[in-house]
Image (cartoon, rainbow, N blue to C red):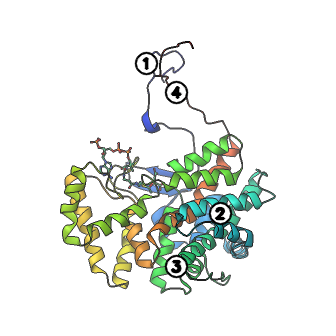
Amino acid sequence: MVDTTTATEPEIRKGLAGVVADFTAISKVNAETNSLLYRGYPVQELAANCSFEQVAYLLWHGELPDAAQLAAFETAERAQRSLEPAVREVIDLLPTSAHPMDVLRTAVSAIGALDPTADDTDAESNLAQSLHLLAAIPAIVAYDQRRRRGLPLVEADPSLDYASNFLLMTFGEVPDRVVVDAFSVSLVLYAEHSFNASTFTARVITSTLSDLYSAVVGAIGALKGPLHGGANEAVMHVFDEIGTADRAEAWLVGALAEKRKIMGFGHRVYKNGDSRVPTMKAALDTLTAHYDRPDMAELYANLEEAMVSRKSIQPNLDYPSGPAYNLMGFDTATFTPLFVASRITGWTAHIIEQRAANSLIRPLSAYNGPDERHV
Ligand SMILES: CC(=O)SCCNC(=O)CCNC(=O)[C@H](O)C(C)(C)COP(=O)(O)OP(=O)(O)OC[C@H]1O[C@@H](n2cnc3c(N)ncnc32)[C@H](O)[C@@H]1OP(=O)(O)O
Ligand SMILES: O=C([O-])CC(=O)C(=O)O
């Protein structure tokens, strides 16, 4: 271990690459075996067999719910789905040109300011606050997309599961089961991924003993960037820029010559492919078939083939998720808020875990400014 207090040449790990910052019992990302476990369960098995509600419960409580626990959890979630009038007023103050991530960040901040329990930071209060955000986020995201399109708010339907209700509130109707299933799979896959940048942001904020809402607002800000969650939106801009499948390779050659980062490819941890991509790609395949969009499937395949053959860099989860959300009918700028709707589960599990064994997160820096001087 490097002694950073006495070494004259401290080892700098730019981007904290390779640094193990703490333990976590929430998920295990294994780049060697290309696997991802949530509380011990392979994410592919969860996506195939569990609802997003079951996965949220698992992340928060450490175990999958039994029938009675799931029923109580669903009842509590369904009771909190309506857009609070004060939150709606805050959203309405923002221009429809505001980015949906900025709208969501502001709305979550407002929910925190309106919650009299916001500064109660025991695990039980944090779980209640987390469930409230889980239930409230679809209403915010759906209402924001609808107001941009000049459409009225759609009320929540407590008889529906989380994914179906989210789609109902966005589009005014529940789409075919294959669409709901693909959406549900995306929510399960996006839910948790160890110490990624947004989760680590939430843990840094929590480590100062700040409140859960502040940590989530910070995490939303970190997720917005195109090197992280903002990549699912950016992938769609790339597809739009390329236009047709036959142009994918030429576009890629030009973009790489300009030293552009190709959105939806590469990962800090996985170097041989993202564990979640095959499952999400299968969901995308059902959607391109359902919506009869072989052109989209071909563009996807051509860009991936060109990128892998030229750079040996594999797609990450944002690559199949972007076009999947496009086919479902979401605005491109709404894609990253959908990531938030899912990741709120992982973020808040980490907030609770950080608080339970807290140590202020405060690394050192090596000064490389001017030598001491005097005015
Ligand atoms: C759900 C998620 O958040 S997954 C991540 C989503 N983000 C994206 O899709 C954005 C595009 N990808 C990237 O920018 C990167 O792959 C990151 C930020 C995700 C990971 O980056 P890092 O671990 O820091 O690796 P780094 O950026 O140093 O890349 C290593 C090398 O691969 C290259 N590389 C990595 N990803 C890409 C890419 N998408 N396009 C082009 N080149 C790439 C880098 O240019 C670098 O090459 P060099 O060694 O010749 O300079
Ligand atoms: O782990 C990361 O760095 C990014 C990522 O894939 C995620 O947050 O899902």
- Mark 2 lies on a secondary structure that is helix
Earlier residue among tags 3 and 4: 3
Residue behind label 4 places its C-beta within 8 angstroms of ligand 1: no
Q: Residue furthest right?
A: 116
Q: Earlier in the sequence, mark 3 or mark 1?
A: 1
Residue 182 relative to residue 156: left or right: left
Q: Please indicate, yes or no, whether residue 171 appears anywhere in the rendered image.
A: yes
Q: CA distance from mark 2 to mark 3?
A: 19 Å
Callout 1: helix, strand or loop? loop
Q: Which mark is residue 149?
A: 3
Q: Of the residues tagged 1 and 4, which is closer to the observer?
A: 4
Give the Cα separation between the discs numbered 3 and 1.
56 Å
Marks 2/3 in contact by CB < 8 Å: the verdict is: no
Residue 340 is drawn in which quadrant? bottom right
Q: What type is the residue that disc 4 sits on?
A: Ser
Tell me the element at label 3: loop
Three-letter code for the amino acid on which mark 1 is drawn: Glu
Kindly indicate the quadrant of the structure image that contains residue 21. top right
What is the C-alpha distance between the residues marked 3 and 4?
47 Å
Check if mark 1's residue and mark 2's residue have beta carbons within 8 Å.
no
Q: Nearer the viewer, mark 3 or mark 4?
A: 3
On screen, residue 61 above or below 174 = above
Q: Position of residue 261 (x, y in %)?
A: 32, 51
Q: What residue is pinned by disc 2?
A: 107
Residue that badge 4 annotates? 365
Q: Is residue 276 visible?
A: no
The quadrant the C terminus occupies is: top right
Which of marks 4 and 1 precedes in the sequence?
A: 1
Identify the residue shown where x is 19% and y is 56%. 253
Asked whether the beta carbons under mark 1 and mark 4 sit within 8 Å of each other, the answer is: no
The residue at which mark 1 appears reads as 9
